[in-house]
Image (spheres, grey):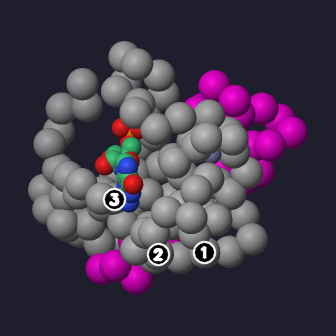
Amino acid sequence: MDCLFCKIISGEIPSKKVYEDEKVYAFYDIKPMAPVHVLIIPKNHLSSINDVNEDNSAVISHVYEVAAKLAKELGIAESGYRVVSNCGSDAGQTVFHLHFHLLGGQKLKVEMC
Ligand code: 5GP
Ligand code: ZN
């Protein structure tokens, strides 16, 4: 499959890894929008939240466990952070491999849209 993030998981395309286990991979966003901007992605290819169902949703709770762990390690757990997943064109999704942005390290804009 011609998927950028699948190629990042396999190492075909280099990335700055933050964390990896059997279910997820986390790496720094190439164009950070905040001092801390990490992408957390399931290793199994899902295109977006639209692909989440009762058979595969366990990985989503794992993503949030990893987000909490990385927020502590990266020093933003106390100051605060945002976890965002854009789904589809109205949300501005540009890479169609499900991913969660972990953003923090500064006061984030209150506006959500
Ligand atoms: P989206 O806009 O789909 O929610 O987020 C995609 C994110 O992937 C963007 O923040 C973009 O900067 C990031 N991105 C795109 N290509 C690459 C890449 O090759 N390497 C890394 N590390 N991030 C990328
Ligand atoms: Zn993929």
Q: Which residues are magenta?
A: 48-75
Label for residue 29? 3
> Is 90 rendered above or below residue 46?
above
**Side (left or right) of 9 relative to 95:** right
- Dot 3 amino acid type: Asp
Secondary structure of the residue carrying numbered label 1: strand
Rendering quarter of residue 41: bottom right
Judging by the rendered image, the residue that carries numbered circle 2 is 17
* 10 Å crowding of disc 2: few (<14), some (14-19), many (20+): some
Q: Where is residue 50 shown, x and y percent of the image?
A: 63, 25
> Is 3 rendered above or below residue 94?
below
| Quadrant of ligand 2 in image | top right
Q: Residue at x 30, y 59 (%)?
A: 30
Q: Residue at x 37, y 24 (%)?
A: 91
Q: Is residue 72 magenta?
A: yes
Mark closer to the chain start, 3 or 2: 2
Mark closer to the chain start, 1 or 3: 1
Judging by the rendered image, the residue that carries numbered circle 1 is 20
Distance from label 1 to label 3 (Cα)? 15 Å
Q: Residue at x 71, y 34 (%)?
A: 52
Distance from label 1 to label 2 (Cα)? 8 Å
CB atoms of marks 1 and 2 within 8 Å: yes
**Side (left or right) of 44 relative to 24:** right
> Is 104 rendered above or below residue 110?
below
CB atoms of marks 1 and 3 within 8 Å: no
Secondary structure of the residue carrying numbered label 3: loop
Q: Where is residue 32 shown, x and y percent of the image?
A: 23, 57
